Amino acid sequence: MADAARKSDPSDFAQGSLTRIILHQAVPVMLAQIAQMLYNIVDRIYIGHMPGTGEAALSGVGLVFPIITIIAAFTGLYGTGGAPLFAIARGAGDDARAKKILGNTTALLIGTSFILMAVGYLFEKPVLILFGADAHTLPYAVAYTRIYLIGTAFSMFATGLTPFINAEGFPRTGMITTVLGVVINFALDPVFIFALGLGVAGAAVATVISQFAAALWVFRFMTGDRAVLKIDWPSLHLEGGIVRRIVALGTSGFIMNCTNALVQIVYNATLSAIGGSLYVGIMTVINSIRQMAELPALGLTSGTSPVIGYNYGAKAYGRVKRSIRIMFALTFAFSLAIWIFISACPHLLMAIFTGSARMIAAGQHAVRVYFFGFVFMSFQYTGQTTFQALGKPKQAIFFSLLRKAFIVVPLTVLLPKWLGVYGVFAAEPISNVIGGLASFTTMMLTVYRRLPADGAPDDTKS
């Protein structure tokens, strides 16, 4: 009877066509991530076209990007750390443990959000100056940060719990979470920025309101009747063993986000010193383009991760291998197509975010350099996601550090000595090739090839 029930369960990833399941998971996740990306990108588009002050305002908001990334890092620490464990527990039929993982993740997200908000207000100005703010850009950066921090709890709650909604087999509901927020943000931005004359501060107000709406939607779902496993008060009580597992598995994503923030700080500081605020603004635009470029691959990996974890927990190792192959093939194809498109029309992409002819002219070559060899990111995505989905934090952490902290940061400092300002942009493609191939090759040799036959003991654990 139990087996029959599981076979009829649409959230049972151990049954049916893997390609269909992965796409069913991935497409709504991709749409959700498009919406998530638009939270901040919509702000940058409107701000970059503000009459007279758009260039300086865009550079100022770009300096806030590391703060936003650090908040995202803590969100991912718990969300992407807890969701694979949740999926594995469900695949093993242990719903009690899965529910406890969900509750502990929720408590960690909420508690940490208030700490981050307090720290942000205490050290706001010195941190922004450290990030490269000057007399022209600091007022815009401060105006945006002070309001944006108000929405920290809303943002972390909604974003951190969306992977759990996906892991329960409701990717469309997860998609609605961020679509709802971005529609509100998109509608309110011109009202607050232009109609009410609030400028940069208006963009932040619109973002906070949209984050609140998304958080309310997630709360209603995760405590309502549709959820397979719900959040309740007993599950919020932290248990040391579960917290350690969540943090251990989420640390790779946390380090990746923190190193992204570190890289952005080094980028901005270096560009400010050798190229001025113009190139800080160009890097802000490039970060926005990268967020768009990564969406198909991130959607596919996010959609595949719970499928890998579920089948791993169910000891369906053949399906785990096939899921990894499908994920790689799709991410490679999307990454190659995106690289070709960006190389062909960088000026059009720059023009989306700024009306400054000077910035568009200077930014075209920088875009081509930064995205050269973008297809190699598919290797990084596949290796990193597989380690993460199978609960192997040590490997995931190492390859997070390798590409960003050990390759990009040193190259960002060294290459400008020979290549000038474009040396900063050249550090990224070099890291994509070295880091991506290293991550993928290690995953294939130490995990993929060592997965046993279905139902046999797993000898890949480390």
Image (cartoon, rainbow, N blue to C red):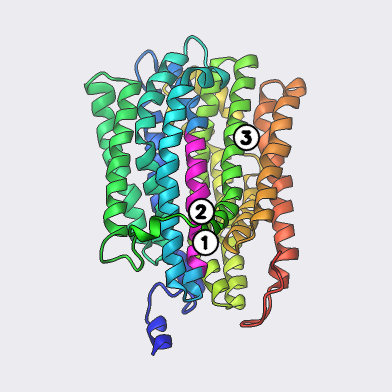
User: Which x, y percent locates residue 77?
Assistant: 53, 48
Q: Nearer the viewer, residue 226 or 364?
A: 226
Residue 265 is a magenta residue:
no
Q: Is residue 50 above or below residue 295?
A: above
Report which residue position mark 2 lands on.
Answer: 80
Numbered disc 3: secondary structure: helix
Q: Main secondary structure of the magenta part?
A: helix
**Closer mark to the observer between disc 3 and disc 2:** 2
Amino acid, disc 2: Thr
The residue that mark 3 highlights is 370
Pick whichever of labels 1 and 3 is earlier in the sequence.
1
Give the residue at x 67% y 75%.
458
Q: Residue at x 40, y 37 (%)?
A: 114
Residue 411 occupies quadrant: top right
Disc 2 and disc 1 in contact, CB within 8 angstroms: yes
Name above or below for residue 298 compared with residue 319. Answer: above
The magenta-colored residue range is 68-88
Q: Position of residue 257 (x, y in %)?
A: 56, 41
> Distance between the Cα atoms at labels 3 and 2?
27 Å
Real-space CA distance between mark 2 and mark 1, rounded to the nearest whole angstrom: 7 Å
